[in-house]
């Protein structure tokens, strides 16, 4: 094994090979136009090791590769995504969140978002845009890191409002509050807008509104996943 392979952090419950394959799949899905060099670097693998796992994913249809060597979503991933869409707990939460986000955007005058977290990243899954001419838009479907962001801080302390300035984009302030972690999803509500508009007074109003929206949506979160002891 090369020294670069050793940079991977093994998870006891996940066999090393399985973890590497899943890491590469997540990397390709997160990076538009991801090639072998980028995938190997991000996964901490040699290109030879990364290519072996990527070829396996390509063979099973989870990934495709174009003539330029860029990897992308394969037909198997598309089929699986379509098959679970109508029954996924996140879809129920999104449906419940839409009117709440609309009200939040109207109250604060800024764009309101719902995000769902997965390990060390979060994905924005729903939005109600501000009606102002200058507003924040375009984050639905985008992934952001949990470290250093308002989302990450909020998810670390559910029910507590977190504020970050310029964490993901310059001159942008995010105000977030996570839903109570009683469900199987880690989710948070955020308001995002230009820093110059979110002064102390606006932040106080926005923080209260975001916290109230998170409490309101907590009742729509999916039920907790039972533990093995509870199943017994």
Image (cartoon, rainbow, N blue to C red):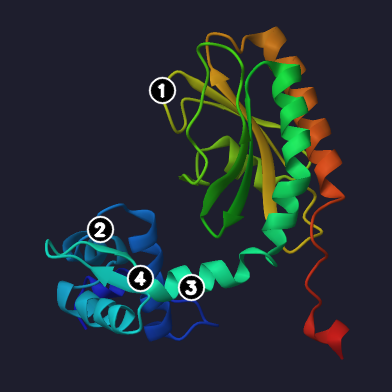
Q: Which mark is residue 170?
A: 1
Upstream in sequence: badge 4 or badge 1: 4
Question: Along the horizontal axis of the image, is 88 left or right of 174?
Answer: right
Callout 2 crowding tier (Cα within 10 Å): few <14, some 14–19, many ≥20: some
Who's the residue at 47% across and 31% down the image?
167
112 relative to 41, above or below: above
Instruction: Find out whether the residues at labels 4 and 2 contact each other: C-beta distance under 8 Å.
Output: no
Residue 34: which disc?
2
Of the image marks 3 and 2, the number of the one nearer the N terminus: 2
Q: Kindly report which numbered mark, 4 or 2, lies closer to the viewer in this rendering.
A: 4
Q: Helix, strand, or loop for circle 4?
A: loop
Q: Residue at x 59, y 53 (%)?
A: 117
**On screen, residue 73 above or below 141:** below
Query: From mark 4 to mark 3, how far is it between C-alphas?
Result: 9 Å
Q: Which mark is residue 79?
A: 3
Q: Which secondary structure, mark 1?
A: loop
- If the image is split into quadrants, where does the N terminus sit? bottom left
C-alpha span from label 3 to label 2: 21 Å
Q: Is residue 177 visible?
A: yes
């Amino acid at each position: 094994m090369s020294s670069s392979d050793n940079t991977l952090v093994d998870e006891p419950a996940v066999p090393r090979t399985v973890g590497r394959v899943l890491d590469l799949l997540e990397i390709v899905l997160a990076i538009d136009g991801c090639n072998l060099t980028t995938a190997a670097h991000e996964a901490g693998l040699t290109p030879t090791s990364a290519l072996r796992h990527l070829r396996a994913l390509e063979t099973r249809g989870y990934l495709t590769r174009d003539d330029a060597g860029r990897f992308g979503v394969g037909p198997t991933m598309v089929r699986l995504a379509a098959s679970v869409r109508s029954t996924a707990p996140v879809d129920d939460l999104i449906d419940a969140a839409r009117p709440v986000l609309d009200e939040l955007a109207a109250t604060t005058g800024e764009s309101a978002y719902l995000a769902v977290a997965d390990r060390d990243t979060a994905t924005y899954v729903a939005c109600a845009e501000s009606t102002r001419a200058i507003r924040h838009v375009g984050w639905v479907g985008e992934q952001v890191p949990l470290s250093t962001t308002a989302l990450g801080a909020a998810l670390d302390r559910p029910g507590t409002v977190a504020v970050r300035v310029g964490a993901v984009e310059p001159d942008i302030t995010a105000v977030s509050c996570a839903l109570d972690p009683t469900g199987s999803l880690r989710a948070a509500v955020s308001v995002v807008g230009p820093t110059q508009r979110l002064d102390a007074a606006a932040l106080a109003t926005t923080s209260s509104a975001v916290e109230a929206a998170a409490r309101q949506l907590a009742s729509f979160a999916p039920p907790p996943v039972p533990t093995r002891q509870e199943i017994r």
